[in-house]
Amino acid sequence: MIDGWHGGDSMTSSDRVTVLLDSLPDATAVVDPAGTIRAVNAAWRLFAVDNGGDPAATGVGISYLEVCARAAASGCREAELAARQLEAVLDGRSAHCAIEYRCSSPVDERWFLMRITPLAGPERGAVLSHMNITRRKVAERDLAFRAAHDPLTGLANRTLFTEQLAAALVRPAARGVRRDVGVLYADLDNFKPVNDLYGHETGDVVLQAVASRIREQVRPQDTVARLGGDEFAVVAPRITAEGLAGLTDRVFRALIVPHHANGRSVLVPASVGSHLAAMGDRVEDAIRSADRAMYEAKHGRPPPRRRSGGQAPPAGADRPGSGPLSSADADS
């Protein structure tokens, strides 16, 4: 068989190219200096089928630049970049290029790495290949999620919470439109005895239930976080004082309902404090104010009567149903 490659068999040069291309695991095509496809492998044809396309539409004799143009017209942002990069390689302005792009099939989400490499030798042209990198992208996404979320509850962790709050405080607003940002802190009361009496497994069930209940009270644009231990927080962008007051009250009342964990009814209420920050406020100041409101709620003292950055009074001001609430208020 090895001797056959040196002229001892009846295979033509075209046959050898076909065999070589079909042996490559990645979808591969060869284009001429004009960008017209001159050869493809089996994986290339299968690539079209897997994505609900017609292999003939991206087969031999078709301009790959036109393929990219059609894809760009249908909304694929990377297609226009691919066309420019291919032209640069064909013109000799670039030695090679690599582009990562998302290409979902009718049944699943997939990612690919497209490489464009100039042909070696006297003939000009390029080799295009598409390598499936979905496993790598999924792993990267999973690592990114783990780095930004609490593993027990799936809520944002302190790092992501701080990033979301910082973004909300600097996000530009339309002229004449207020864009105050609510910050809510909740600290579970008497949670430690749950772990001591019933074990950490029961405590974990309670923490997951708390996370679920808080999620149910917020808006889609809000970020719920577990800051660690039994502390939870919410960033509520584009909210009014009344809206934050209502959110504070809803979260408090959702958490005074007993939890059912491992066959036990466990009462773990929370002290809840909130602060209405103004656009341009410092992140650390907004967090400190919400934490202070929560602390004052836990110890039965009302928050100080002051305005946040000259804006409307923060949720927790001395108004019916709008103040930070502690477990002591459950029956009032």
Image (cartoon, grey):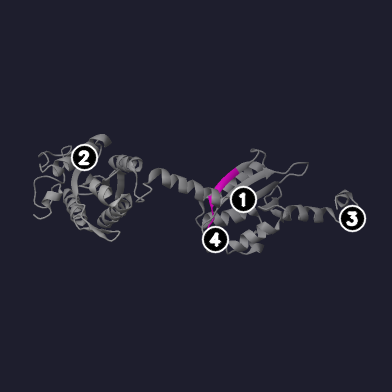
Q: Which residue does the image show at 23% across and 47% down from the upper left?
A: 193
Mark 3 — residue? 9
Whichever of labels 1 and 4 marks the residue nearer the N terminus, that label is 4
Instruction: Name the residue nearer the viewer: 228 or 127.
Output: 228
Mark 1 — residue? 131
Image side of residue 84 versus residue 181, left or right: right
How far apart are the two marked residues, 4 and 3, measured between alpha carbons? 41 Å
Task: Identify the amino acid type marked 3.
Answer: Asp
Residue 101 within the segment the image draws in magenta: yes
Q: Quadrant of residue 182?
A: top left
| Residue 176 seen in the current view | no
Task: Identify the amino acid type marked 2.
Answer: Asp
Q: Quadrant of residue 313?
A: top left
Q: Which residue does the image show at 66% across and 38% down from the upper left?
A: 95
Q: Nearer the viewer, mark 2 or mark 1?
A: 2
Whichever of labels 1 and 3 marks the residue nearer the N terminus, that label is 3
Question: Quarter of the image containing the C terminus?
Answer: bottom left
Mark 2 — residue? 291
Highlighted magenta segment, given as a residue range: 98-104
How far apart are the two marked residues, 2 and 1, measured between alpha carbons? 50 Å
Q: Nearer the viewer, mark 3 or mark 2?
A: 2
Mark 4 — residue? 105
Rendered location of residue 318, percent (x, y): 8, 46
How far apart are the two marked residues, 1 and 3, measured between alpha carbons? 33 Å
How far apart are the two marked residues, 3 and 2, measured between alpha carbons? 82 Å
Residues at marks 2 and 4 touching, judged by CB atoms closer than 8 Å: no
Task: Identify the amino acid type marked 1.
Answer: Met
- Classify 10 Å Cα crowding around label 2: few (below 14), some (14-19), many (20 and above): many
The secondary element bearing badge 2 is classed as: helix
